Image: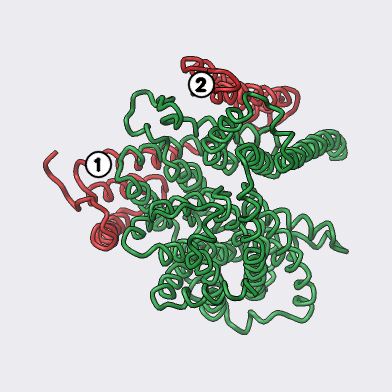
Chain colours: A red, B green
Amino acid sequence: MRSARDYTDIIGGLLLIAGGTWFMLYSTGYNIGSLRRMGPGYFPMVIGGLVLLFGVLVLLPGLFRAGQLPRPEWRPFLTISASILLFALIVERFGLIPATVALTLVAAVADNQSRVLRTVILAAALSAVAVGVFTQGLGIPIPAIRWSY
Amino acid sequence: MDMFANLALGFSEAFALQNLLYCFLGVFLGTFIGVLPGIGPLATISMLLPLTFYVPPTAALIMLAGIYYGAQYGGSTAAILMNLPGTPAAAVVCLDGYPMAKQGRAGVALFMTTIASFVGSTIGIVVLTAFSPTLAGVALAFGPADYFSMMLLGLVAAAALAQGSPAKGIAMVLAGLALGMVGTDVQTGQQRFTFDIPQLADGISLVALAMGLFGVSEVITSIMRMREVSRQKQESITLRSMVPTKSDVRQSWRAMLRGSGVGSFFGTLPGAGTTIASFIAYAVEKRLARKPERFGQGAVEGVSAPESASNASAQTAFIPTLTLGIPGDAVMALMLGAMIIQGIQPGPRLVTEHPELFWGLIASFWIGNVMLVILNIPMIGLWVRMLRIPYGILYPAILLFICIGVFSVNNSAFDVLLVMIFGIVGYVMVLLKFEPAPLVLGFILGPLMEEHLRRAMLLSRGDAMVFLERPISASFLALTFALLAWSLFSAIRSMQQRPRTAAAR
């Protein structure tokens, strides 16, 4: 979709301006110090200011030229993010196998051509690989399954 | 000759059975993950990092390095056959490699990339062997101000040479520097931007950041794209189809040498990296060509030059890492981390204090590259067959390996959560056309830069002129300034050209 302004750079510039401003203000809470003896707040404050400056430099040209609207693909974006979130929440509490199964099943939804049987087989196979290679082979200390939490 | 004695020491180390074995394992895995789109050397190295606790440092580093340069060989296979780069640097190979495949010359393209990779690597290794000890000697004289200016040059180079607008590149470098501030301040012990989360006290995990920005966002964008790719029919590659014609060879060998030169140079710059090297090598070939319109239509130089450049730069990238202790990209930062785990401090003293490790590693590069040629020419059919694995099976596996890889570095589920957050950030960056590579570099160099800046200012009693008074620092700053001026100039010129081309349309 074409638009009169380059919204890609306008959004990007605004995000940088917001982030830079916040970062700069937040670092004033630390000791700034002097040029000779810089405190922990000095460098972050300068960086925040520069992010703000370059945010403006990205934003301004975008206001005066045509561009394309970014078009997110919501389905893969949301399901992939959710699958990683589930892995992170499950792995320490319930072990590697439940986390692997959850990740595989949810991630499969991202592709609307996934088949149920193939996904189940894949989840089982990946669990076996994960436990065999990582817990047994490389000795990563995650139990395969843990029930108490 | 000193150099030959050193190399002899290196080869005797690298030919030890255990080291040979780990070298083979590294290059094999490297080729494997290089062929597969969506998983790069970074994920693989972080997954195998726990292994380095059990094997001696030389063997571990030989293997990790093998993964890195092995992936450069494999990356072009998917680029040529499916128009899909296996590694970011291989994106350039798509431009002419895929048209060659469509003309039925996939075999030749694959053969030329392997040869170009070998030529590039060999030249890169020669540069590495010849210059590292000298540079390490010079680097002993580097003060904090010099280090700061050098890193500044690296960051500006990464931003200015990245694709897209230089302003966006510099903005990403700065965002990376800001993210690098998270954690405990080394000099005062002050917790910065940690929001009282204990897992952030040591800073944001580099692996989590890089995997989110590169790995996860790559998977999200690939799912839709791969569906179109999977409909294509694939031909099998026979050894006979790989034989290049005389004119292929004649057109390529100069391109390979030029590409290797470009790659060797950009590899040594902290921050430029393999992707930039291959893009610039392609641009150079196109400019020098008598018929530039052949490019994009299956010109063999368009495949061999960037391929040799990316491999040469993969080798010379070890120069700043090993001799200065400054990593040029995320993979090198991880290698640096692996050395520190083993109690080896990379830097100017590495060459003299651990000669067996330093020269053993370099000798293993040579051995590894010979192995890679054998893996890639007679065994090409195996790698091609791997590309037939449907992406629907591949991407859950890639996600799982990313999660386990990140988890295993610190045994922390919090890091996996960070992967999700940076995956979201990375996808937003893809949508808004921001490059992740400069951000990661800024993140890596940020804490180092701050430390050297503060030390330099303390030593000079707050006099900022110290950066111009020291000759080494001043020349780095002059280069930085020239680069900025050049990118400003080319940005203005392209802005003036744009309305004209729009009117022509």
Judging from the image, mark 2 belongs to the subunit labelled A
> Camera-side residue: B30 or B396?
B30
Q: Earlier in the sequence, mark 2 or mark 1?
A: 2
Residue type at the position of mark 1: Ile
Residue B128 or B381: which is nearer the viewer?
A: B128
- Tell me where residue A33 appears, x and y as whole percent: 53, 18
- Mark 2 nearby-residue class (10 Å; few <14, some 14–19, many ≥20): many
Whether residue B235 can be seen here: no
Closest to the observer, A105 or B50: B50
Amino acid beneath label 2: Gly
For label 1, the crowd category at 10 Å Cα-Cα, with few meaning under 14, some 14 to 19 and many 20 or more, is some
- The residue sitting at 56% across, 42% down in the picture is B441
Q: In which quarter of the image is residue B268?
A: bottom right
Q: Is residue B230 visible?
A: yes
Q: Which residue in the structure is indicated by mark 2?
A: A41
Q: In which quarter of the image is the C terminus of chain B?
A: top right
Residue B222: % across, % down: 51, 49
Q: Name the residue under label 1.
A: A90
Identify which residue is drawn at 50% across, 19% down.
A27
Which numbered tag is attached to residue B3? none
Q: Is mark 2 on a helix, strand or loop?
A: loop
* In the image, farthest residue toward the left: A148
